[in-house]
Image: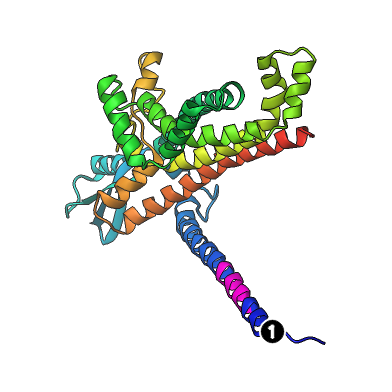
Amino acid sequence: MTTATPHARRTRTIELFVFWTFRLATYFVLACASYIFLDIGIKGARTVFTSTPPFVNVAFLSEPPQTLYVFEHEGKKMTLSDREFREWKATNGEPAVAASSVAYSAGGIWPCIVGTALLVLGSMALALGIGISSAIYLSEYSRNGRLIRLVRIAILNLAGVPSIVFGLFGFGLFVIFFGWNVSLLAGWFTLGLMILPAIITASEESLRAVPQGLREGSLALGATKWQTIRKNVLPYALPGILTSSILGIARVAGETAPIMFTAAYAMRDEMPWQVSRWTDFVFQGVMALPYHIYVVSSKIPQNEYTERVQYGAAFVFLAVVMLITLTSIVLRERSRNRLSW
């Protein structure tokens, strides 16, 4: 029977210490994330769901934001939205004590949901179209020369640029120089450029992961370069490309600074489709959930009524992002199941 040397015992102690350091760090991150999601989930659910049928706060999910009026009438505390308050005054006259108003604390967030979905879908369509095309060129057509290496380094550097810089760039180029003003189109291009480096990098890596033998076999059978890429390379790289789209969706949906400069309004009465000409659709600004949460949380006095809207909007925002992301994950898994190497 052999005994462990002091050096071996010291090595095992260090290994055990490193193991528990990494394990506790992981548990700490999970605990923090769980606390945040539980806090938003519990408090937000009180706004989104009700205890009476249909058990969903339909008004919160289907109406635009309104001002909340708070006042006392016949010894009871009244909280009415702007529309309800005007109807009440038409019947009862002015309240005996002047009503206090709280902006954005009544009504709902339907225009914000629609605006967020439009911004995500439009920017992802642009980013995926341009990003996949660039990745195909870099992976399949370009030669690994000095210029291409510089391009790859530039793409990696752009991925680390703060979102506020992209917002200022989009404001200067699309809003002012191109004259698109604060609009969906300016927001799409700004957000699309912001996530383009990550999509190009991930898509190129997915294309490079496809075995070279699939390309050579296709070319040997007489297929052209583009036929080989379209039939033998892209289908096998699609799961990795969809993974990059998932990361892009999560970042686009949660950005506030870029859309604040290029696409978002604090308040808009009309819905995006309420335009006189269809060409005006892309040249109008929209409300968006992240910007709405920012406005309600920092631009108006805080009280119990604003907290209700903040957590409700954050809850719906997380649900929308999870829904779009889940759709991408399902498409990715279906693509993987159809493929066999």
Q: Judge whether 32 appears above or below 106 on screen.
A: below
Quadrant for the N terminus, please.
Answer: bottom right
Q: Is residue 16 magenta?
A: yes
- Amino acid beneath label 1: Thr
Q: Residues within 10 Å of mark 1 (few under 14, many from 20)?
A: few
* Viewer can see residue 196: no
When asked about the image quadrant of residue 204, the answer is top right
Identify the residue shown where x is 46% and y is 26%.
Answer: 147
Is 303 in front, or is 56? 303
Whether residue 138 sits left or right of residue 2 in the image: it is left
When asked about the image quadrant of residue 162, the answer is top left
Q: Judge whether 50 appears above or below 243 on screen.
A: below
Is 170 in front, or is 279? 170
Chief secondary structure of the magenta span?
helix
Is 79 in front, or is 142? 142
Whether residue 335 sits left or right of residue 146 in the image: it is right
Identify the residue shown where x is 44% and y is 30%.
Answer: 192
Identify the residue shown where x is 28% and y is 30%.
Answer: 171
Whether residue 90 sits left or right of residue 337 in the image: it is left
Colour style of the rendered protein structure: rainbow
Q: Which residue corresponds to mark 1? A: 5
Q: Residue 191: where, in percent of width, then height?
A: 41, 33
In the current view of this chain or complex, which residue is farthest to the right? 1
When asked about the image quadrant of residue 172, the answer is top left
Q: Is residue 88 magenta?
A: no
Q: Judge whether 272 appears above or below 160 on screen.
A: above
Q: Residue 336: where, in percent of width, then height?
A: 72, 36
Please state the extent of the stretch shown in magenta in the rendering.
13-22
Quadrant for the C terminus, please.
Answer: top right
